[in-house]
Image: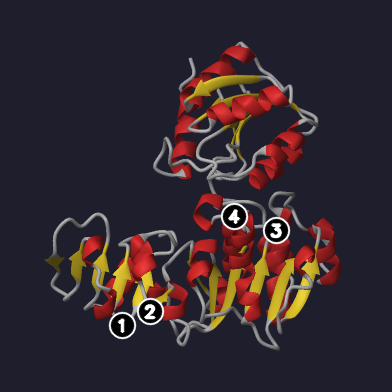
Amino acid sequence: MTIFGYGKTTKAIVDKFGNCTVYDDKFSAVTMDKNGNEFLPPEMFDPYKSNLEVTSPGIPPSNPLIQKAQNLISEYDLFAKEMPYSIWITGTNGKTTTTNMMQHLLAERGSQEGGNVGSPLANLDQSAPIWILETSSFTLHYTNIAKPNLYIILPISPDHISWHGSFEAYEADKLKPLTMMQEGEVVILPKKYADYPSNAFKIPYESPEDLATYFEIDLNKINFTEPFLTDSLLALATTKILFDELDYEKINTFQIGSHRVERFRDKYKRLWINDSKATNVDATIAALKSYKKNKINLILGGDDKGADLTPLFEALKSYQVHIFSIGINSDKINTLANNYDLPCTPCQTLENAVKNIDMLLEKVASNSVNLLSPAAASLDQFTSYAQRGEDFMRFVQNLS
């Protein structure tokens, strides 16, 4: 078996099967391990000597390895025949939280969580009754055999444009499984896709209220608000479909993970919010909604992956906001802020942004909300959104 890329997903495949030939930029010479796996630089790949290629999901279609491949499949396709009843969760924002919530509700029934979060498919138990898979657009792009039994689609908005080439291509990859699903299978999807071709039974929604009405969920019994309310409703909808069960008590015990609208206070009791996981426009817009009545000091910027930031600035017009720009797209943010007549302080780095907000607040208690919600990926200045969030909290706590 030929493997493209040597990351978490493909390492698990290599460990499971052995006798793999792995191509990755990190290899500059041919080496071999004790299990018969061979590691080579990408330029040595010969498509005529390979019968099957499995790619790491993050490798873009423009990569020479992908371009040369003649028998290319995804991780999902590799396990299509062995996959038990599977629930796939996709969309632009909320995939991880929705997946985690479903696992929280279904773990006692033997479900296993994996895909883009949790374990690679190669490490999941194929005898488990249910796989709950957070599913990225990258994986879906390369998947042409496997399909979900229950497909949960959160709202889709522009993201990963530079990888897919356009929003339309990104959107098409998210919707592709619908064309493969069969009668008796179910998809919960945004109402705008209600007419998308599929043999699956469609349950369209446009708002949390739509989901609550269809599944007879009492919103008053749920402790979450947006941006997590829809996630919790989709998790409950899943247990209603599978087991005709709505466990309000259990869903309310779920704890939201780090770096997503994570509130904390500094030594002066001022409110700061770590929303480093907001890597696109829609995530930032969702984070803002709870703070309509507050003055907001908003840290924006990073690698926006070619996304159009105009919808964000259209939304910001209705807020009392001061922008502090960081990262590789700072100039773009500064220009948009000027065009929309919004106050903006160029900071370049996250540490400078925190210091500038601190000076603005003059070290007194304030009802302002100081929000890191970058609407951009982190890799221009950090190793991950998690490191960005951790650094943000450290910079705040170290203020003198």
Residue 348 visible in the current orientation:
yes
Q: Amino acid at mark 3?
A: Pro
Q: Earlier in the sequence, mark 2 or mark 1?
A: 1
| Amino acid on which disc 2 is placed | Asn
The residue that label 1 is drawn on is: 51
Q: Residues within 10 Å of mark 3 (few under 14, many from 20)?
A: some
Contact, CB < 8 Å: mark 1 with mark 3? Answer: no
Tag 3, which secondary structure? loop
Image spot of residue 194 (x, y percent): 78, 71
Secondary structure found at label 1:
loop
Q: Could you tell me how far apart the alpha carbons at marks 4 and 1 are, in whole angstroms?
A: 31 Å
Secondary structure found at label 2: loop
State which tag comes first along the sequence, 2 or 3: 2
Picture quadrant of residue 180: bottom right
Of the image marks 4 and 1, the number of the one nearer the N terminus: 1
Count of labels in the image: 4
Q: Amino acid at mark 4?
A: Ser
Residue at image coords 21%, 60%: 41
Q: Which residue is mark 2?
A: 71
Upstream in the sequence, badge 2 or badge 4? 2
* Residue of label 3: 155
Real-space Cα separation, disc 1 to disc 3, in angstroms: 37 Å
- Label 4: few (<14), some or many (≥20) within 10 Å? some
Q: Which corner quadrant of the image does residue 44 belong to? A: bottom left
Which residue occupies 45% across, 33% down? Answer: 391
